[in-house]
Image: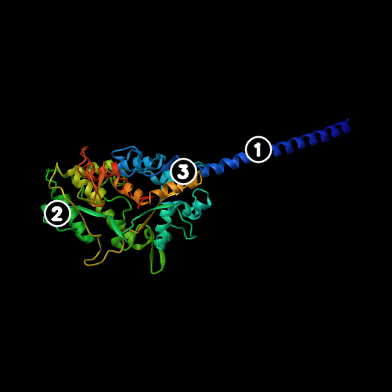
Amino acid sequence: MIMRTRKLSRYAVVLIILGLFTTTLAACSGDSSESVESTGSEQNQPLTKLTYWVELFPDAAAIMKSYGEVTSWKEIEAKTGVEIEFQHPAQGQLGEQFNLMVASNKLPDVVDYAWNNYPGGAQKAIRDKKLTPLNDYLEYAPNLKKLLDDHPEWRKMASTDDGDLIGFPFIRENVTQQVFLGPAIRKDWLDKLNLSVPTTIDEWHTVLKAFKEQDPNGNGEADEIPILIPAGELAFAGAFGTPNDFYRENDTVKYGPIEPGFKEYLATMSQWYKEGLLDKDFATAATDSKIKDAKITGNQVGSTVLFLNGGIGKYMDLMAQSQPDFKIVGTPYPTLNPGEKPVFGYMDNPVTGIFAAITGSNKNVVGTVKFLDYLYSEEGKLIMNFGKEGETYTLVDGQPRYTDAILKNPDGLPISQAFRKHIIGATSGPFV
């Protein structure tokens, strides 16, 4: 009985092996080659649809649900035949939602983000197969390649330390460095109280106390918010000789928040808070644009930190009719002592560090590269910066000029929001 069982087992094993062998041959000659063929054909097919994850800029979020509504992107879709499915993280949750997304096994085709903020940096994202570097695909991106070949320093800024090109960068083509964000103050309040624009921390303290105590908004109530500073704001920390991040000093890399100067900065902010000079809701107002908008347009905020067009320009436009005297001006970055030169501030390099990166989940890398490279072409740049010819811009003596659809838009939007409705106008890639 035992012998018969053994013989039966050997016979069964032979049959199983033969069956497996036949199945394997069938797989190799059929299913497997079809899979390889399919992958290859996907890479060679024209791109028709793209999933694109990107932050919806606060000004845009106030008037739209998706960048798919923007005139420039509609025109790009019409010119290229590529349908873009935009995916936007919730406002104020960019970092958290990025981390949740990359922790998953399925990513959108393109993720527009400061990829060096990935845990371990962009190089780690490449090792983790979350990001596909562009080095081997530049032949399909002649416009970007020319920009990087003509400006080798830009390529360094757009690459990891190992030389891997992270993605399609935002580039300021004709600017070496630009201050785009900084302290701003109500000039009409200063004029009313006979005060000058502050330049030192002590001068700021004097001005803020006057804003709190002397009713500059003229409503007879003590409702003024002298200053609204978002948590961790660099604009005032720099006065104490330290930023709120890593920096280099005499060829040594340091971390600002553990330096003595940062402790002095926090002590000063704590004192301002106790004196009622600092907005008590600074943490919420920093992430919720609607709260910040309400406080500034409600004639409560005396000073804050603003972008140029999307901040100062935005609020000047919003208040132009209801309060003609309303005026905000940018101020120098503050210092501790008169005459000192600010060491830290918001200045951007030509390559900002935010990239439209092709993810490891993308099934048509070549098609995506060709599509994104179009945005660096002369036609692509014109659309991204000016929108649709005849609708948002016209050519005058060969130069693009915005139309009244933006400058005197029928919706009555501030110019900064009218720009967002029609023009990309963000600080992320792929954009020149």
Label 2 neighbourhood size at 10 Å, few (<14), some (14-19), many (20+)?
A: some
Say if mark 3 contacts mark 2, CB within 8 Å: no
Q: Amino acid at mark 3?
A: Asp
Name the image quarter holding residue 412: top left
Above or below, 343 relative to 417: below
Label 1 neighbourhood size at 10 Å, few (<14), some (14-19), many (20+)?
A: few
Residue sitting nearer the eye, 401 or 321: 401
Label 3 neighbourhood size at 10 Å, few (<14), some (14-19), many (20+)?
A: many
Above or below, 142 relative to 110: below
Marks 3, 2: nearer the viewer:
3
Per the image, label 1 sits on a secondary structure element best described as helix
Per the image, label 3 sits on a secondary structure element best described as loop
Q: Which residue is mark 1?
A: 30
Q: Which residue is mark 3?
A: 109
Residue furthest out toward the front: 397
Asked whether residue 325 appears in the rendered view, the answer is yes
Q: Earlier in the sequence, mark 3 or mark 1?
A: 1
Say if mark 2 contacts mark 1, CB within 8 Å: no
Residue 83 place in picture, x, y as percent: 41, 38
Q: Is residue 89 left or right of residue 410?
A: right
Q: Earlier in the sequence, mark 3 or mark 2?
A: 3
Q: Which residue is mark 2?
A: 190
> Which of the numbered marks, if any, corresponds to residue 420?
none
**Which residue shows up at 15% across the image and 58% down it?**
196
Q: Is residue 342 left or right of residue 143?
A: left
Marks 2, 1: nearer the viewer:
1
Q: Mark 2 to mark 1: distance in Å?
A: 79 Å
**Which residue shows up at 82% across the image and 34% down it?**
11
Marks 3, 1: nearer the viewer:
1
Q: Amino acid at mark 1?
A: Gly
Q: Mark 3 to mark 2: distance in Å?
A: 50 Å
Q: Amino acid at mark 2?
A: Leu
